[in-house]
Amino acid sequence: MDGENIFLILTFDSTHHAMRAESILKDEKISIKTIPTPRDITLSCGLAIKASVLDKEKIVKMYEDKILDFKNLYEISIIDNKRELKKII
Amino acid sequence: MKEIDARGLECPKPVILTKKELDSIKEGKVRTTVDNEVARENLIKLAKSQNADFEVEELEGGLFAVTIEKKASIETENHKKMVEVDENFVIAIQSEHMGRGDEKLGEILMKSFIYTVKETKPYPKTMLFFNSGVKLTVAESEVLDDLKALENEGVEIISCGTCLDYFNLKDKLEVGSISNMYTIYEKLRNSTNVVTIG
């Protein structure tokens, strides 16, 4: 997942939400990384979850089925050292 | 070729002797004979950290010989410049948790911390792990990928041998090398910028 130029960032209202989501995603064997919320996303708590763009559909589905709760879902792409932030949810 | 007989020496002695020898020559080969696998692995790590070619031979009687070749080094110096390591910066990690108060929170903060170290240049020259901090450098640690990436960029990752031993993790080490208190003290003493986390 690391080093990929396109990835997902999930943000949360609180640290507890982030920790709960981390354990749910891990149980689903989705490869994730808990990271400090990137500086270009400000409206959320300090922890975010980074996930592979390949798991986008799975994560969106889990959100819709109310298995997984988060505040926002972003897709970040880094092209020629420029970061682009796209809000999906 | 210079030969070093490091049989019967305790870690990290074989590595120190070999590094001294490599530092003293401009180019050439150093062949170190050791009698255990930990020492062999540490020599391989030394070679990798120096960006040097190496060769491992398995000798009779459970002995290993590691030959490290140092090349006259325009390339090595360029490499050093590229990776941007702050030679005076050491991070000491004394626990698998960051801060006290709540362990679950501490665990998640530590993951977040190590990720941030990996994302931010310049890198520290050395990261020391002791007490339960060594749980971060062994199999099943969730920060292994970050620590491996840091090691690849030239950051020295050192775990306390006594601590690995205490937690029964000596054979599970996945990144960096094993060292003792002398090395840990030396790293701390030789730097005026030590940040302790844990």
Image (tube, rainbow, N blue to C red):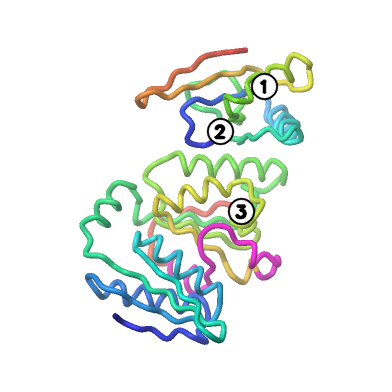
**Left or right of B131: which side holds B48?**
left
Helix, strand or loop under label 3: helix
Residue type, mark 3 in image: Leu
Q: Which residue is mark 2?
A: A36
Q: Position of residue A70 (x, y in %)?
A: 68, 21
Earlier in the chain: of badge 1 and badge 2, it is: 1
Label 3 CA crowd tier, 10 Å (few <14, some 14–19, many 20+): many
Instruction: Give the magenta-colored segment's residue range.
Output: B165-187
Is B163 included in the stretch rendered in magenta? no
- Which residue is nearer to you in this view: A77 or B2? B2
Residue type, mark 2 in image: Pro
Q: Residue at 45% across / 64% down in the picture?
A: B45
Q: Are marks 2 and 3 on the same chain?
A: no
Q: The residue marked by circle 2 belongs to what chain? A: A
- Quarter of the image where one finds residue A88: top right
Q: Which residue is mark 1?
A: A13
Q: CA distance from mark 2 to mark 3?
A: 18 Å
Residue type, mark 1 in image: Asp
Helix, strand or loop under label 2: strand
Q: Badges 1 and 3: C-beta atoms under 8 Å apart? A: no
Q: Which residue is mark 3?
A: B136
Label 1 CA crowd tier, 10 Å (few <14, some 14–19, many 20+): some
Q: Badges 1 and 2: C-beta atoms under 8 Å apart? A: no
Quarter that holds the N terminus of chain B: bottom left
